[in-house]
Structure formats: structure tokens, C-alpha cells
Image (cartoon, rainbow, N blue to C red):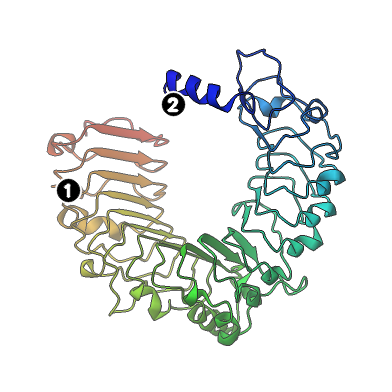
């Protein structure tokens, strides 16, 4: 905001809305209702008690994590509606948080808390609970399903721990449920998603080994959740699955068909031999990631067509053999392939601009130059058996601007006159290729 407009807004708001910045030392008036704290010397909760009418308190500073917050009772802040303590060094949360009956927004992301008090479940008006990157948090209060007005529950998808949410199906107002782990022991089943018709943005479902058949998978009603943009489906990924378990994975994935509005799809540690036909008919998909699908041989059905797919990532799919024909992926611009040693040479992908190959079979090199006429960025990484780059494999990639070669331990020889034959090349990066001594060979 322009300085003059900022001063005007501040004068109109009077002393009810205050933004306390680094160079400000003025006294906070007792009638303040909205405080945004951007000072290194973080205020303690005890100091807030005198602001009986406080509605909003936001901590908004990169320095706040250096200064711990005193865990004082909240009994004096009964009118608080928004409390943002993200990035602070708070470790324990007082039971008196349950006194804030008007609280609608609670942000504890990037803090050190290891548990939430059970009293949190009495916050009947709470609509948003942000717990992203709470690395020490091990569980949620058992009564979390009492928060019937909760709309947004943000949990980190990539943490080492997994939080199960039994009976979460009662929270039918949820719009954000970023992570959902299935667990038979805790009673957290996929049927809990059945009536969550308002889910938006994204959801990552893990522990799908606990789903026993197609009918149970269909109970999640993913096909009816038209507001979901991103979907992650993850199994435990055991290599020694029996034939029955492999077949069950295939049936379960078939039953988890999402709405055609889906934009991004992740499938991880899936144990089936093939992907279901519905993947090839999610016409609005822009991004797909297949990771650790160790038994699959084919990506898309022959009649599949993904006209808007821009990004495709294939990681650790060693039995994958056939890459889809170019006419199935007309808009593909980014392809990341790693640990797919049996993948066949790439077909004519004239739209591809960014390609990364890691720990794949050398047969992928055979047709790079002739097929990838628009390629501008190429990264080759962790090829352990390549002693020399195949002669002519980059020619004529006339559009290539950036070439990265990483962690190729056996690489010794460089194709003669290669750099002269790449007229558009602007950047060349080579590192962790210890046996390559010269680019003049």
C-alpha cells in the first residue's frame, strides 16, 4: 500500500487497528481490537490482558521464532476471534484456550507444539485450524470431531509422522483436509469421506492398503467431489504383495475414481500391474506424478487422451515399458523420469520444453534429438554406467538453452564438437562428474 494511503487508512481506523513494526515504540491503546505484531521483541500473552476488546492478534515476523511466548491463561481474552502464533517458539498450549468461545481462526503452523489440549475441542465456532509443519505434533485431540463448524484443517502432507482422524466424517462442513490417513486400528476408514461434499483444493489419502474392496473405495464418493483440484493416493508399498493383494490394489484404485474437474493427480506406492482406464479420461488434468509404482508396465489406456497435461513425473517405476504416444499428450511441456530403466525411447513430443532423466536405461538416449524439437532444458543425472555421451544424441537440439549433467560418476568422454552444434545453448552445468577431465575430446 502506498504510504499516503496507509496513513489515511490508519487515521480512519483510529486506534482500533494497529500494526506494530520494528521501528515503532508507541504505547498500544487499551481499546485496540486488531493488532498485527511485526517486532522482534515479541509481546507475551500476559501483556495482552489489558486489551479486553481484542478481536485479532497476528504475529507476522520472521524473528518471532527466536522469542518464546509465555503460556499464560486466555481467560481475559474472551472476545478473541483470530489468533495467529505461527513461526513462534511456543511449545505448550494452555488448557484455557477453550475459554475463547468466539475464536474462528487458529494458526499454529511452524511451531514446536507436541500436542493440543483437549479443551480445543470446545471451540464450537472454530472454522480454521492450521497445523502445517508442526514437526513435533504426534496426535490430535480425540474430540476434534466436535468442531462441527470447522471448514479448514491444514496438516502437512510430508511429515514423518502420520495422524489418524477417526470419525472425522462428522465434520461435514470441511472444505480443506489436506492429509487423511487410513488406519483400521483407530477406526479411521475411507467411508469417513463419504459426506464431505464441500472438500476443495487438495487431499492426500494414505494407508490405502486398509481398503478391502472396490465397494468400500467407492464409498469415499471422490467422483462427486467436483471442487477438488489435487488428489494424492498412497499405499504402503510392500514389494512382496500376494496376487490377491495386487488384484485388490487394482480394484481399490478403480473405485477411487475422482471427478473430471481434477487438475493434479499423485499415485504413490501402488501395487497393481496396470492403472485404471479412468486416468486417461480426466480431461482437465495438468499434472500427474506416479511414484514407486513398481509393478506397472503401462501408463495410459490406448484410448486415453489428456489434452491439457503439462507436467508428468515418473519415479521408481522399474517395469514401466511403453511411453504414451505423443497424440495422447499434446500439451506436455515438462517430463521428469527417474529410476525407470526399462522405459522405451520417447515418442515425438514436439511440445516438450523441460526434460529430466535420472537413473534410467541408456535406450532413452536413442531418439532424443529427432523427437524433442522444442526442448530448451535438459538435465541428465545419476547415470552410473555411462562412460561417454552417445555420439549425436543431442543433435540437432537447436532450441536447447540449458544443459545440466549431474552425478554421472563414470562419465569420461565428451562428444567432439558438441558445444559448437548447440547454437542456442546459454548455460552448461556439470558437477559431481569426477572422471570427466575435459570438454575438448
Does residue 412 appear in the picture of this structure?
A: no
- Front residue of 177 and 353: 177
Q: Position of residue 324 (x, y in %)?
A: 28, 69
Earlier residue among tags 2 and 1: 2
> As drawn, is 46 to the left or to the right of 57?
right
- Front residue of 158 and 198: 198
Q: CA distance from mark 2 to mark 1?
A: 55 Å
Identify the residue shown where x is 45% and y is 70%.
Answer: 226
Residue 337, compared with residue 319, is above or below; it is above
Q: Residues within 10 Å of mark 2 (few under 14, many from 20)?
A: few
Q: Position of residue 403 (x, y in %)?
A: 28, 39
Name the residue carrying label 1.
Answer: 392
Q: Indicate the quadrant where residue 348 lies.
A: bottom left
Identify the residue shown where x is 60% and y is 12%.
Answer: 23
Quadrant position of the C terminus in the picture: top left
Name the residue carrying label 2.
Answer: 1
- Front residue of 100 and 177: 100
Q: Indicate the quadrant where residue 42 lies.
A: top right
Identify the residue shown where x is 65% and y is 48%.
Answer: 130
Residue 210, compared with residue 440, is above or below; it is below
Q: Secondary structure at mark 2?
A: loop
Mark 2 near mark 1, Cβ–Cβ under 8 Å?
no
Does residue 341 appear in the picture of this structure?
A: yes
Residue 236, compared with residue 131, is above or below; it is below
> As drawn, is 180 to the left or to the right of 352?
right
Q: Position of residue 49 (x, y in %)?
A: 81, 30
In front: label 2 or label 1:
2
Q: Secondary structure at mark 1?
A: loop
Identify the residue shown where x is 79% and y is 30%.
Answer: 45
> As drawn, is 277 to the left or to the right of 305?
right
Amino acid at each position: 500500500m502506498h504510504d499516503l494511503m496507509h496513513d489515511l487508512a490508519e487515521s480512519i481506523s483510529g486506534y482500533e487497528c494497529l500494526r506494530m513494526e520494528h521501528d515503532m515504540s508507541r504505547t498500544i491503546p487499551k481499546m485496540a481490537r486488531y493488532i498485527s505484531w511485526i517486532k522482534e521483541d515479541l509481546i507475551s500473552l500476559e501483556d495482552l490482558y489489558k486489551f479486553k476488546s481484542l478481536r485479532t492478534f497476528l504475529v507476522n515476523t520472521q524473528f518471532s521464532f527466536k522469542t518464546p511466548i509465555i503460556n499464560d491463561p486466555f481467560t481475559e481474552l474472551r472476545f478473541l476471534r483470530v489468533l495467529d502464533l505461527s513461526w513462534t517458539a511456543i511449545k505448550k498450549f494452555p488448557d484455557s484456550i477453550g475459554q475463547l468461545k468466539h475464536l474462528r481462526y487458529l494458526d499454529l503452523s511452524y511451531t514446536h507444539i507436541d500436542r493440543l489440549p483437549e479443551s480445543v475441542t470446545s471451540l464450537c465456532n472454530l472454522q480454521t485450524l492450521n497445523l502445517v509443519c508442526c514437526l513435533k505434533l504426534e496426535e490430535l485431540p480425540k474430540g476434534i470431531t466436535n468442531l462441527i463448524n470447522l471448514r479448514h484443517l491444514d496438516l502437512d502432507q510430508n511429515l514423518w509422522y502420520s495422524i489418524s482422524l477417526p470419525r472425522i466424517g462428522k465434520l461435514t462442513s470441511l472444505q480443506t483436509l489436506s492429509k487423511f490417513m487410513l488406519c483400521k486400528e483407530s477406526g479411521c476408514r475411507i467411508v469417513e469421506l463419504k459426506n464431505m461434499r464441500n472438500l476443495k483444493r487438495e487431499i492426500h489419502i494414505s494407508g490405502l492398503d486398509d481398503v478391502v474392496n472396490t465397494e468400500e473405495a467407492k464409498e469415499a464418493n471422490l467422483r462427486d467431489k467436483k471442487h477438488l483440484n489435487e488428489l494424492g493416493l498412497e499405499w504402503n508399498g510392500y514389494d512382496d504383495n500376494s496376487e490377491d493383494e495386487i488384484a485388490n490394489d487394482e480394484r481399490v484404485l478403480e473405485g477411487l475414481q475422482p471427478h473430471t474437474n481434477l487438475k493434479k493427480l499423485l499415485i504413490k506406492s501402488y501395487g497393481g500391474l496396470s492403472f485404471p482406464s479412468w486416468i486417461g479420461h480426466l480431461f482437465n488434468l495438468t499434472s500427474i506424478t506416479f511414484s514407486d509404482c513398481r509393478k506397472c508396465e503401462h501408463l495410459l489406456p490406448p484410448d486415453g487422451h489428456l489434452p491439457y497435461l503439462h507436467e508428468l513425473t515418473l519415479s521408481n517405476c522399474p517395469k514401466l515399458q511403453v511411453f504414451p504416444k505423443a497424440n495422447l499428450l499434446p500439451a506436455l511441456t515438462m517430463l521428469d523420469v527417474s529410476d525407470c530403466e526399462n522405459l522405451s525411447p520417447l515418442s515425438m513430443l514436439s511440445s516438450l520444453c523441460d526434460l529430466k532423466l535420472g537413473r534410467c536405461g541408456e535406450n532413452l538416449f536413442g531418439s532424443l534429438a529427432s523427437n524433442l524439437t522444442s526442448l530448451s532444458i535438459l538435465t541428465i543425472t545419476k547415470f552410473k554406467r555411462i562412460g561417454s555421451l552417445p555420439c549425436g544424441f543431442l543433435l540437432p537440439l537447436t532450441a536447447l538453452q540449458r544443459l545440466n549433467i549431474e552425478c554421472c560418476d563414470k562419465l569420461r568422454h565428451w562428444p567432439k564438437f558438441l558445444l559448437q552444434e548447440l547454437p542456442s545453448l546459454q548455460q552448461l552445468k556439470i558437477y559431481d562428474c569426477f572422471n570427466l577431465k575435459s570438454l575438448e575430446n
